[in-house]
Every structure is written in C-alpha cells, then in structure tokens.
Amino acid sequence: MDNYRTILQRAGAGLIGVGVVDMSYMTYRLSQGQGYSLGFNSLALVAGMFLLGGSLRAVPIITGFAAFRLSIFISTLFILMTRKSNQYK
C-alpha cells in the first residue's frame, strides 16, 4: 500500500537534485556577470519537496507543469531546426 510513497520520494529527490544543480549554475552565471534565463529551479525544488513528503495532491499539478515544459522544449527544438534549415536556402 505504501509503494506509491517510495516512487514519490524518488521522484522528489530527483527533482530536488535537478533544482539544486540548476540553482548552482544560476548562481555561478550571475556571479560571473553573465546572463541566465530562468530555468525551473524554484519550481523543481518546491515540487520535489511536495513529492518527497508523499503528497498525492501535488502529482496532477506537477504533471501538468511537466507536460507544459515538455511542449515548450519540443516546440523550441522544432523552431530552431526549421530556422537553421532555412538559413542555407
């Protein structure tokens, strides 16, 4: 019955890890005076904390945000690929 908690805890730990790495990279870039476009560091940390606590209420919200981010990523790749192929014509 508690199998879902171990899955949520693993996913939460992964999101927290990604959020910490992203925040570290952001801090490094800003300390070097370089620009940084905001990733999903704070969202990953908050979502990771909810999942680490085993909150099933957070799962649909996090899934929605993940689907939205995935669609942005795929559409950006598509735009970049079509833009690059149009440069050579």
Image: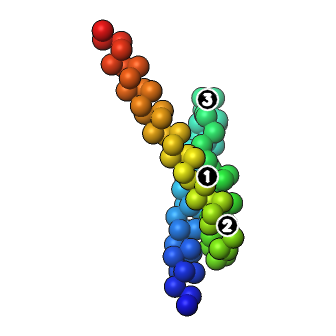
Disc 2 on helix, strand or loop? helix
Q: Is residue 49 visible in this depiction of the protein? A: no
Q: Image point 62% across, 59% down: which residue?
A: 62
Cα separation, mark 1 vs mark 2, equals 11 Å
Q: Which of marks 3 and 1 is nearer the N terminus?
A: 3
Which residue is situated farthest in the left direction here?
Answer: 89
Q: What residue type is labelled 2?
A: Ala
Q: Earlier in the sequence, mark 1 or mark 2?
A: 2
Residue 18 picture location, percent across and down: 54, 56
Cα separation, mark 3 vs mark 1, equals 25 Å
Residue 74 picture location, percent across and down: 45, 39
Q: Image point 61% across, 29% down: which residue?
A: 35
- Report the side of 39 relative to 76 (left or right): right
Q: Image point 60% across, 34% down: which residue?
A: 36
63 vs 36, nearest the viewer: 63
Residue 44 picture location, percent across and down: 62, 56
Would you call the spot at circle 3 few (<14 residues within 10 Å), some (14-19), or many (20 or more)?
Answer: few
Q: Image point 43% across, 33% down: which residue?
A: 77
Q: Dividing the image into 4 quarters, which one contains the N terminus?
A: bottom right
Q: Quadrant of residue 5?
A: bottom right
Of marks 3 and 2, the one in the foreground = 2
Using the image, tell me which numbered label, if any, was put on residue 35.
3
Cα separation, mark 3 vs mark 2, equals 32 Å
The residue labelled by disc 1 is 65
The residue labelled by disc 2 is 58
